[in-house]
Image (cartoon, rainbow, N blue to C red):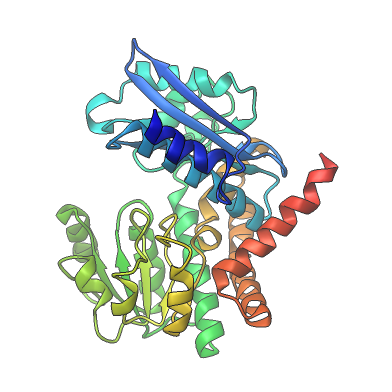
Amino acid sequence: MTDVSDGVLHTLFRSDQGGHEQVVLCQDRASGLKAVIAIHSTALGPALGGTRFYPYTSEEEAVADALNLARGMSYKNAMAGLDHGGGKAVIIGDPERIKTEELLLAYGRFVASLGGRYVTACDVGTYVADMDVVARECRWTTGRSPENGGAGDSSVLTSYGVYQGMRAAAQHLWGDPSLRDRKVGIAGVGKVGHHLVEHLRAEGAEVVITDVREDAVRRILDRHPEGVSAVADTETLIRTEGLDVYAPCALGGALNDDTVPVLTAKVVCGAANNQLAHPGVEKDLADRGILYAPDYVVNAGGVIQVADELHGFDFDRCKAKASKIFDTTLAIFARAKEDGIPPAAAADRIAEQRMVEARPLR
């Protein structure tokens, strides 16, 4: 228990990264479910965030990830203009091995027990079909299939929002939002990344991709025999000469003490959550003249989509909201320049201001 007290509990109660309202540890021995639900803030409304299903190396790692992700959702939802706070859930285990209907139903019962304080959705390792199962036990479930009253795959608007963020970065840096003839490197062409390729190719950008799954790369190359190339790994991608934009679209921590010094791109704008390995990385990027579009701002299209399910889903309405990510990102760059701080810090200040101003109203 010493490691837990020194690590997770310190983060929860005593660190600047803490401040979470509630953390729930869930276990159902019959189905094998072990899960963590973290609610960071309900200042703006019920906490909203996806469910990650992942084979963590330890329970402590799972709790720490849930805390970190939940906090990020508070900021994401605030910057997206949603009336939702931030929450996140993680299910511990390899989804390819232990995911069953019984486990998902048990998880749904735990979410339902919170009475609407937390609204769940898809994340890494969970899919629309999974949310359909969870929804059988919990009405506070989004990311469901259209057949079950949901919006379907949220990665569609996630990629669209990232694309809008890239356009804003291009406008700020080069004075033109067009990405035509720009060279964009995408690390991870799964749920979100492959949609992002479509947006970029439609505008005439040159795209370089990589993914740990060869089939994912092959699918993109088969669809785009021209204008798209592949490299062996992310280490190669970030060193690619002539790269204008780097888009991390896999797991977090992509920007760290090892990768930032060798980045060739002038812009980082991707879909992955928690791209900054530690707070000092944003300054390292700024010192190198690399413009960073805060991840939780540009990847908010998905949460905009699933939040809309609670009000009767309308795709055109959601896409219009996701289009505003362009203006929001530009406003962050302007605030950063005005305050003399990196964009990530500027985004945090704007989000925190919205949460603080909303708190007395609830």
Residue 194, percent from left and from top? 33, 59
Specify the quadrant that holds the C terminus. Answer: top right
Q: Residue furthest right?
A: 361
Viewer-proximal residue among 222 and 63: 63
Residue 42, percent from left and from top? 68, 39
Residue 302, percent from left and from top? 51, 50
Q: Is residue 9 above or below residue 231?
A: above
Q: Residue at point 35% right, 66% down?
A: 256
Q: Residue furthest bottom?
A: 175
Query: Which quadrant holds residue 277?
Result: bottom left
Q: Residue at point 62% right, 72% down?
A: 332
Viewer-proximal residue among 304 and 319: 304
Q: Is residue 114 left or right of residue 209?
A: right
**Residue 177 in view here:** no
Residue 210, percent from left and from top? 23, 64
Specify the quadrant that holds the N terminus. Answer: top left
**Residue 68 in view here:** yes
Q: Is residue 40 left or right of residue 213?
A: right
Q: How many marks?
A: 0
Q: Residue at point 29% right, 30% down?
A: 93
